[in-house]
Image (tube, rainbow, N blue to C red):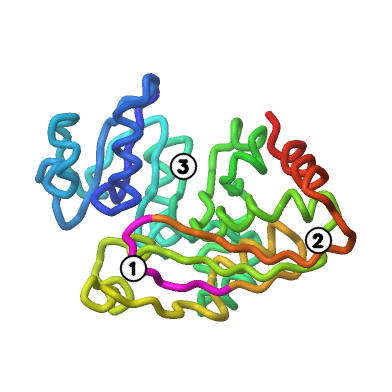
Amino acid sequence: MIRVSIAGASGYAGGELLRLLLAHPDAEVHQITSERLAGKYAHRAHPNLRTLTRLRFHTLDELTESDVLFLCLPHGESSRRFDDLSRIAPRIIDLGADFRLDDPAQYERFYGRPHPRPDLLPRFTYGIAELNRAALAGADLVACAGCNATASILALRPLYRAGVADSAVIEVKVGSSEAGNRSTPGSHHPERSGAMRSYKPTGHRHLAEIRAVLGAPVHFSATAAEMVRGVLATCHVFLNRDLDDKALWRIYRDAYAT
C-alpha cells in the first residue's frame, strides 16, 4: 500500500481527492491537514465521508513521513513551504498553481508577483496524463493543471499537434466551486444566484498554461455561470485547411487512442 497524506484536505479539491483516495485499492490515507479544523474529524468539512473514514485533521507542522504528499494549499503556500514539505515525502503532487509554469517571467505577468522559488519550476512535470503519461509515471514532483486549462488543452491540442489550427478563441462557463471554499464576491451564492457575468475576459492566469502547452496563439475568456461544479469550454478554432467530419474524428482518435 502507498501511504499518502493530503495537505489542505478541508477544501474542495482536498475533499474530492480524499474521497477518491479512500476508494483506491493501492492507497492508504495516512494524514490529512487543516489549520482551521485541526483535531476535528474529516466529516466536519465533508459530511459525505462520515461513513468512510475516521481520520482527523492535523496541522501542517504535525505531518509525518509518507510515500506521497498531495498539496491542496492556497496559491503561494506550496512554494513558500516547499523545503519543509519536501522532507515529508519523496514524491509531491501539487494541486495548486505554484509550479504549473516553467517560465518565471510568465508567472510574474499572470500572477502579478515574482515567483518565490523559480529554481523549482524546471523540476516539476505538468500533470495532464494525456500529454505526459510516461513522464508522470516516474516523476517525483508533479504540478496538476488548472481546471479551465485542462478542458481547453484537451479540446485543442489534437488540432495544433496535427498542424491544422492557426488560432483559437476559448470561452469557458465556470461554476462557483472553482473559486474555492472561502466566500468571495465572485463565489458567494447571493452574488451569483440568477446571474451570469464575465469573470475574466482578459488576463486569466490559465491562459498562460494553455499557451505554454499549445505553443500557439489563443484567446481566452471566462464567464461565471449559476452552477456549483463544472467547466464548459467552447473553443472556436480557425483552421488552415478544410476538414470534413471524418478527418476531424481521425485527428482526435489518433491523439487520444491509448
Q: Quadrant of residue 75?
A: bottom left
Residue 222 among those drawn in magenta: yes
Give percent across and percent down for residue 9: 27, 47
Kindly identify which residue carries mark 1.
226
N-term mark: 2 or 1: 2
Which amino acid does the dot numbered 1 rest on?
Glu
Asked if the residue under mark 1 is in contact with the one under mark 2, i.e. CB atoms within 8 Å, the reply is: no
Bin the neighbour count of mark 2 within 10 Å (Cα to Cα): few under 14, some 14-19, many 20 and up: some
N-term mark: 3 or 1: 3
State whether residue 125 is above or below residue 239. above
Which disc, if any, is residue 165? 2
Q: Residue at x 33, y 62 (%)?
A: 227
Residue sitting farthest toward the right: 241
- Circle 2: element type: strand
Bin the neighbour count of mark 1 within 10 Å (Cα to Cα): few under 14, some 14-19, many 20 and up: some
Bin the neighbour count of mark 3 within 10 Å (Cα to Cα): few under 14, some 14-19, many 20 and up: many
Q: Quadrant of residue 134?
A: top right
- Circle 1: element type: loop
Which amino acid does the dot numbered 3 rest on?
Ile
How far apart are labels 2 and 1 at the CA level? Answer: 32 Å
Q: Residue at x 33, y 68 (%)?
A: 226
How far apart are labels 3 and 2 at the CA level? Answer: 35 Å
Kindly identify which residue carries mark 3.
92
Q: Quadrant of residue 184?
A: bottom left
Q: Of 217 and 39, which appears nearest the observer?
A: 217
Give the foreground label among 2 and 1: 1
Magenta span of residues = 221-229
State whether residue 140 is above or below residue 222. above
Question: In the picture provided, is 47 more to the left or to the right than 98?
Answer: left
Residue 29 among those drawn in magenta: no
- Circle 3: element type: strand
